[in-house]
Image: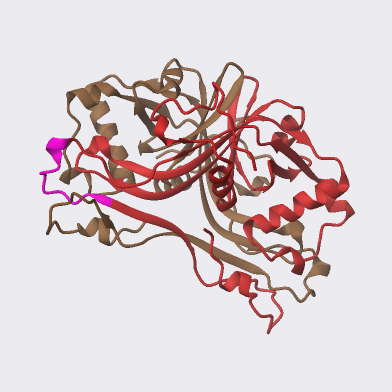
Chain colours: A brown, B red
């Protein structure tokens, strides 16, 4: 696991203290998030599309229908930016100006490649499922040939990557500390509620423990 | 509140049933999210940056330091895409292929304009605070002249906009319904834990009810 070297395009310039380039921080953020935002350009217009992803080592996988415009455009090797953001808390300062959000984000720049090797493609499909729910893959029906054909998988190497992290409480101007205003952080978490069985679920099918005891971070 | 007319660029082409263009759906998604992802192009490279925002009527406001590269680029009137995504649940099907996520997203295309009128700018700053925590603005110190100068505010008109929404349980292939696999939805929510007071909070400052009883949706 080697760390990332900031480039002129990924170095965090505003508030450089928040910039992180170590692989451990980057991977942890990527593995905790459900969704990434994929940015690409078509006819001079940027588009930002939310989608699921998977990661193994220093490769991020994207996928979608073979009919998807986005996947088709990206597979032609155009520049892409993939961004992942986790919001951890609301930072409530004494002044409006110093209000903030505690967050962890990763920005990846590069070009994606079509995955054509069937075993790499199947492994990526396993990663997509396991990324949202570890333990799920071993229980379900795996993709058949037709489904494999209908799915495009792209691989984006994690090379030009940076993370940005804000933690901790508000930082107010000295003269504002005397104001009679509550200040601090309201922590935010992603939590689950009771699993909702499918209307056609066979009676008596137990909820697997990887669902009932699901925890994200 | 008038609805949006899908354009060739915003019409949802894959799974068109998920496309929504009514203002009520769009505004509800925007108002529930904490963070938007702003996409823009610099030197041919797309960038996707997470940031806070505010909305009133059919205007979305973005802000940041006057020194921010992103804000400077956007204020020149280059094309922008702002995307907001909420993840509502994990959709667990009997086959890997039909796994999905319940989500609500909004994609906005357009160009942003610098807000120079001081009263519109102050109103936007109020919106940023109230967007993350309603009730907060009336208690805190408002931006002074120097802070106003140091903050760039951009207005993006909500004109070319679409939403995409997936709800409900998994849809499996007919022959998979007999598999002995639990299927359904694991709902996800954003919840808060106990507010963490700032280390320099004056003893005895009560937690306002808009914080202690905070609910997002």
Q: Is residue B175 magenta?
A: yes
Residue A217 visible (yes or no): no
Residue most extreme to the bottom: B204
**The N terminus of chain A: image quadrant:** top left
Q: Residue at x 66, y 45 (%)?
A: A16
Q: Position of residue A157 (x, y in %)?
A: 42, 28
Q: Residue at x 77, y 42 (%)?
A: B153
Q: Position of residue A77 (x, y in %)?
A: 46, 17
Residue most extreme to the front: B2
Q: Position of residue A82 (x, y in %)?
A: 50, 33
Q: Residue at x 76, y 32 (%)?
A: B75
Looking at the image, which is closer to me, A178 or B138? B138
Q: Residue at x 60, y 60 (%)?
A: A90
Give the main secondary structure of the magenta stretch.
loop
> Magenta part of the protein: which range?
B174-184
Residue A59 visible (yes or no): yes
């Amino acid at each position: 696991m080697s760390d990332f070297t900031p480039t002129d395009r990924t170095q965090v310039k505003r508030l450089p203290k928040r910039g992180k380039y170590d692989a451990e921080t980057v991977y942890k953020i990527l593995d905790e998030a459900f969704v990434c935002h994929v940015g690409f350009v078509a006819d001079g217009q940027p588009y930002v599309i939310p989608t699921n992803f998977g990661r193994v080592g220093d490769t991020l996988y994207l996928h979608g229908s073979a009919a998807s415009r986005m996947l088709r455009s990206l597979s032609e090797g155009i520049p892409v930016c993939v961004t992942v953001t986790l919001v951890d808390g609301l930072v409530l300062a004494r002044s409006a100006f110093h209000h903030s959000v505690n967050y962890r984000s990763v920005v990846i720049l590069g070009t994606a490649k079509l995955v054509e090797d069937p075993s790499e493609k199947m492994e990526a499909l396993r990663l997509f499922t396991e990324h949202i729910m570890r333990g799920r893959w071993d229980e379900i029906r795996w993709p058949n040939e037709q489904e494999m054909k209908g799915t495009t998988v792209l691989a984006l190497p994690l090379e030009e990557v940076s993370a940005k992290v804000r933690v901790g409480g508000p930082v107010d101007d000295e003269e504002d500390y005397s104001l009679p205003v509550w200040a601090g952080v309201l922590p935010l978490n992603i939590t689950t509620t009771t699993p909702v069985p499918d209307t056609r679920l066979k009676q008596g099918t137990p909820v697997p423990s990887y669902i009932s005891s699901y925890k994200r971070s």
